Image: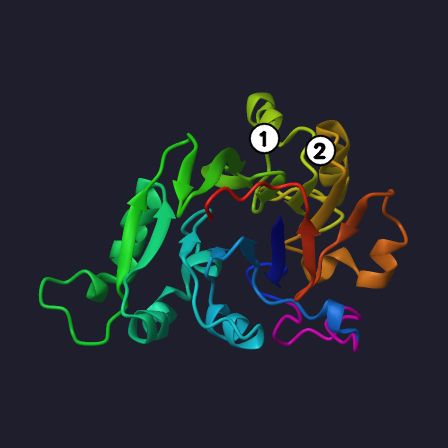
Amino acid sequence: MIKVTFLGTGTSQGVPVIGCSCKVCSSTDSRDKRLRSSLLVEVGTKKIVIDAGPDFRYQLLRESIGDIDAILLTHEHKDHIGGLDDVRAINYNHNKALPIYCEERVANAIKRDYYYAFDKRRYPGVPRLNLNIIQNSPFKIEGVEVVPIRVLHGSLPIFGYKIGDFSYITDASNIEKRELLKVSHSHTLVLNTIRKESHHSHFCLEESISIAKESQVKRCYLTHLSHHIGLHQELIDTLPLGIEPAYDRLSIKIENYETDNI
């Protein structure tokens, strides 16, 4: 079984947006309060987080997560790597460097942004990050197979990921047919949907619905939602059966995953 918890479902600014008084940012519905997009995937006893943005520390505290086995990164934008310094508590409490899985370009951005963690004369207490370079081919984290899904974020090539019968894609604006085949017939797909109107580097609502239908997944959750998408409850009422907006702290289960020796 796979258990998935949405640590955050918002865009790079989160919801509410600073200084905005629109009906979404002013909403009292907790489902309209969105931290930056991040996800916890639990397979057996293994805990893998996908993306660690600026809200990473609070997201772990809010869910009482004291340890994780690895972090998967989709790409190097700050709303996806801006919280990596906060792995220090895990380093200290569990006496381990935290494995980070990403492609080489992302690893280079981490080395640049967190240069002090890789200095030859490291200051005591800096984050200990064990960078693992991945390609567009399956790999394993502590026995859990991960299949990268190549997508485009505007012109930037980034990764989504498939674990068992669960697929996660965020910050995408285009997926080639051969990559979409990896997602095809998944039990659960999570897909970014920034707003109803078209956008240059993210799927809009119409595009996400089309992809969910084309891939013939059993259920699809929308994430990376901006305040332009509208109120959570109003959005639910307009979506086709099997497609719904995710929200922070939502947990779902995919029952048919085999956990051999995990």
The answer to if 233 sits in the magenta stretch is: no
Kindly check if marks 1 and 2 are in contact, taking CB atoms under 8 A apart as contact: yes
Amino acid type, label 1: Ile
Q: Quadrant of residue 169?
A: top right
Tell which residue pokes out farthest to the right in this image.
237
Mark 2: few/some/many CA within 10 Å (<14, 14-19, 20+): some
Vertical placement of residue 182 versus 26, above or below: above
Cα separation between marks 1 and 2: 9 Å
What residue is rendered at 22% in x and 62% in y?
115
Who comes first in sequence, dot 1 or dot 2? 1
Start-end of magenta stretch:
15-28
The residue under label 2 is 211
Q: Main secondary structure of the magenta part?
A: loop
The residue under label 1 is 175
Tell which residue pokes out farthest to the front in this image.
261
Tell whether 76 sits left or right of 190: left
